[in-house]
Amino acid sequence: MTMADHTSESSISSSPQGLLRLTKDFIKNVSAHHTLLAAAGVAYYFALALVPAVVSIVSIYGLIAEPDEVAVQLEPLTNALPQEAANLVVAQLRSVTAIGNGEVGLSLAIGLFGLLWLVSNAFNSSVMAIRIAHARRSPHNWLQGRIFALKLSAMGLVVTTILIWVVVALPRTIETAWFANDPKSWINWVRWPVVLLFTSLSLAWVYRMVIGPSSRTRARVVAVGIGGLIWVGGTFGMASVASNADQLQATFGSLGAVAVLLVWLYISACAMLLAAEAESVLAEAWVRRPNRRIWRGSENEKNHP
């Protein structure tokens, strides 16, 4: 990047007129691409994928745990859930650990197959929405697209597991080990910057896999930072809402935990897709292409994975 390009980028992003123009372009793209509606579809697919995911996790756990040990071993995780949801999870785990290994193996196989298929559907919808934000055509046929979505699914499951561990289990583990006398440890606040960094890096990896290298690295850095802030802010808000179980019960009844989960999935999808829209707008402005085309031709498609 030349000094002139850097100066142009700074003037666009720092002046009131430049910020207003970027904001208008961003809102226009979000409206034209129906980004919030697409996020709802992505969240729906991820919600469907939760069912086989729970079956798989429960089945795997049932191979190695004793029924009487379930509640004790999962206490750090179930304490973070509403009481009704925690009781349901523990009861399901105990029922699975009490049955024979043959039945557990069958439910595990069914769960893993359904998990891979539904999660790949969720990631496939995410890939399509990200490409729409950047006005890119898919370089894959159906089979290649499914394999690509499965690769993202595997990495997404790993990332999600790590994030859940960092948000829920890690603070309790550290407090138990080193801060037993300080239940309001600083670790509960330190975890959020760590989650923000990890989320931003994960978004950058997803965008790199889906649309290739960015035409402006700075645009991608800013965009994934925006996406990370949206996700962490939404997750923190949902955690605060979920902690007030009485109000949830009064408003949603027995569906309170489900409502919180669905809203959190929607916020997660919005963070990913809005960040993609932000990167598209910033890169376009900083590359100084005022007349955006609907599809950008074969040159950009060469960068596709």
Image (tube, grey):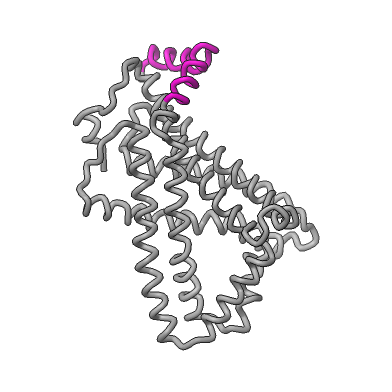
Instruction: Count how many numbered circles sit on residues in the image.
Output: 0
Q: Nearer the viewer, residue 70 or 183?
A: 70
On the image, the x and y values in percent for residue 49 come to: 43, 60
Q: Residue at x 65, y 47 (%)?
A: 190
Q: Residue at x 39, y 44 (%)?
A: 206
Q: Can you say which quadrant of the picture contains the C terminus?
A: top left
* Magenta segment: 2-28
Q: Nearer the viewer, residue 174 or 109?
A: 109
Q: Is residue 181 magenta?
A: no
Position above or below: 94 against 252: below
Position above or below: 21 against 52: above
Q: Residue at x 41, y 25 (%)?
A: 281
Q: Can you say which quadrant of the picture contains the N terminus?
A: top left
On the image, the x and y values in percent for residue 130 come to: 37, 39
Q: Is residue 234 left or right of residue 34?
A: right
Q: Residue at x 55, y 12 (%)?
A: 16
On the image, the x and y values in percent for residue 67 come to: 59, 83
Q: Is residue 182 left or right of residue 58?
A: right
